[in-house]
Amino acid sequence: MADPEKGTAPAAEEDMSEEEVDDVEEEGEGGERKELVDKLMKDPQSLPVAVKRRVKALKKIQLEYTNLEAEFYKEVHALEVKYDKMHQDMYEKRRQIISSEHEPNDEECDFPSDDEDDEDKNLSKDMEEKAKIEDKEEKVHDFDENTKGIPEFWLTIFKNVDLLAEMVQEYDEPILKHLSDIQLKFHDEPMGFTLEFHFTENEFFTNKTLTKYYEMKCTPDKEDPFGFEGPEIFKCKGCTIDWKKGKNVTVKTIKKKQKHKSRGAVRTITKTVQNDSFFNFFNPPPVPEDPDEEMDEDTQALLTADFEIGHYIRERIIPRAVLFYTGEALDDEDFEEEEGEEGEEGDEEEEDDPDYDPTKDKSVKGQQPADCKQQ
């Protein structure tokens, strides 16, 4: 019989622990907060007039902060320009070593290397000869002690970095072997930068330098000032490549058959279409002069990818070129993705194996399946 002083609460509530009661209260408070947030998002005008005035005052302060942030980024760009002038001497030394114009002396080469410990230095002649024979079986390049400079330096970087490797086709590689340097030039007004790709004389085009110009804006949008997150690229311009006859890898010729509607006669026409190539990078889609003009989705996607690549080359490839050449600067995420893909393939192989019995597999006992996260 229920105690009259305790009311007639259900037995289930009497059995609830203090922790469960707290959880229920928190859920109630959380639900109320969510309801309030949803209400404000749907109808911010529902706030009292006095509160709305204070919110406007806060937004005005926020706009002042955003404008000040824009000035900060402009000063950062000015610092980049200042220090870039100091970097040029180092970039020129790098270029000279890569191109074999300068052979570094012992002092310039005095840098610790992971693969040069005492044991390696004291290898006997017999071991060295054996190593040479084994190397011939899995030779990845034709370099030897007589090789000058560092051949295919920039091509190796392009193939090491996934973002760039996706652009490079097999027929691009013989051209990129002639890429001798990539230089960066900053601009103040308007804010921006130019990437200069320098090539040695080759059989593909007559240009010595191919350029890609990027223009940036560092001013909050009047219609959406709070969307400002720093300088952003909004325009780019490539250059004309003077291809030698029959060497243009950015186009391909296809043959199509056409049938006359009434006569039934068939004719073959030749048509030139765009071909996948890294060198399309120098022919980006035009950006409308009118900022209010809408672009189609495909053009927008191409420009977004182009801006990302240009920024990556400027911000990471050029300053840390040697580390991308050796692979030391590659993102750890790239390696994790590869391992994940291998793991997934392994799982599929196990599922496809009719003789596989997981109950007899000691390696999976006691393990729980990992969560599958879509990215």
Image: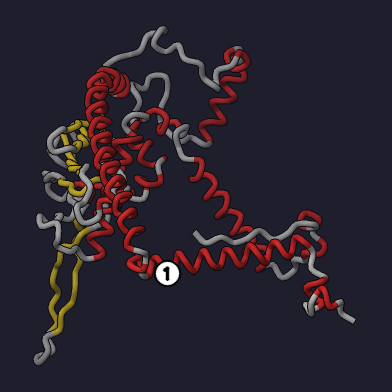
Left or right placement of residue 119 versus residue 298 in this view: right
Task: Write the residue at 37% across / 8% down.
Answer: 105
Task: Write the residue at 21% across / 65% down.
Answer: 296
State whether residue 346 is above or below residue 99. below
Question: Mark 1 Cα within 10 Å, few/some/many (few <14, many 20+)?
Answer: some
> Considering depth in this image, is 161 or 207 the residue closer to the camera?
161
State whether residue 162 is above or below residue 47. above
Q: Residue furthest right?
A: 1
Q: Secondary structure at mark 1?
A: helix
Q: Quadrant of the N terminus?
A: bottom right
Left or right placement of residue 101 versus residue 107 in this view: left
* Amino acid type at mark 1: Lys
Q: Residue furthest front?
A: 5
Task: Write the residue at 19% across / 69% down.
Answer: 255
Left or right placement of residue 77 versus residue 260 in this view: right
Where residue 325 sits, quadrant-wise, is: top left
* Tag count: 1
Q: Position of residue 200 (x, y in %)?
A: 20, 31
Q: How is the image coloured?
A: secondary structure
> Considering depth in this image, is 156 or 146 the residue closer to the camera?
156
Residue 94 visible in the displayed image: yes
> Considering depth in this image, is 14 or 258 the residue closer to the camera?
14
Where residue 259 sits, quadrant-wise, is: bottom left
State whether residue 64 is above or below residue 364. above
Q: Position of residue 13 (x, y in %)?
A: 78, 73
Residue where numbered disc 1 is placed: 39
Q: Position of residue 100 (x, y in %)?
A: 29, 19
Left or right placement of residue 20 versus residue 332 in this view: right
Where residue 195 sits, quadrant-wise, is: top left
> Considering depth in this image, is 209 or 53 the residue closer to the camera?
53
